[in-house]
Image (cartoon, rainbow, N blue to C red):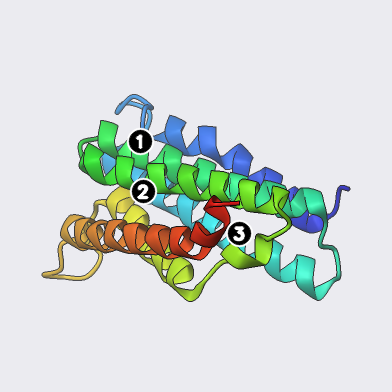
Amino acid sequence: MFNIPTALTWFRIALIPILVAVYYLPDSWMAPALRNWLGAGIFVMAALTDWLDGYLARALGLTSRFGAFLDPVADKLIVAAALILLVDLDRAPAYLAIIIIGREITISALREWMAQLGETRSVAVATIGKIKTAAQMVAITALLLFEPVIPKISTPHVGLIALWVAALLTLWSMFHYLRLAAPYFKK
């Protein structure tokens, strides 16, 4: 089913190669500071479309099984692409990216398995997952930007601290979801 929320999700997926390409343009095409602002802006746009597509789907009654499948896939793709990009740019440690991406794969697989059991509500998105996502968005945006925004506050340091917070919340939320699913492991 093609509708505005689904189109926004596809748009978010289409932003991924654009985001990555921005950081590999030659300096003669784009100054590094402009590259950072543009890249961070693209990522923020993707984050806003994530919120908007969900809001519109619910408000307009346009939710669908395909949209419910595609939306988290788009989220995980852009986060994974941004984290890999940040590792390649030497702005984020690989081990934090591995923790976050590994958790996303694990919980996606867990949710798929629970859906097969008819128990999707058992691992529905919890508040800790939403806080983790917010920390990720702040971290990735700050690390993509990498430019001073507020005097005497280092954007890279804010981004790295937020990435550590996101990684810790990532582990906490993963164990939370695994604990909820634990009774079904024996079945």
Does dot 2 land on a helix, a strand or a loop? helix
In this rendering, the count of numbered labels is 3
Q: Residue at x 80, y 56 (%)?
A: 4
Left or right: residue 83 compared with residue 112 = left
The residue at the far front in this view is 186
Does dot 3 land on a helix, a strand or a loop? helix
Mark 2 or mark 1, which is nearer to you?
2
Left or right: residue 41 compared with residue 184 = left
Mark 2 or mark 3, which is nearer to you?
2
Residue 164: horizontal and vertical position, in percent? 23, 58
Q: Nearer the viewer, residue 45 or 64?
A: 64
Q: Residue at x 68, y 60 (%)?
A: 119
Q: Residue at x 27, y 61 (%)?
A: 168
Residues tagged 3 and 1 counted as in contact (Cβ below 8 A): no
* Pointer 3 or 1: first along the chain: 3
Res. 84 mark = 1
Res. 50 mark = 3
Q: Of the residues shown, which amino acid type is indicated by label 1?
A: Ile
Q: Which residue is mark 2?
A: 100
Q: Of the residues shown, which amino acid type is indicated by label 3?
A: Asp
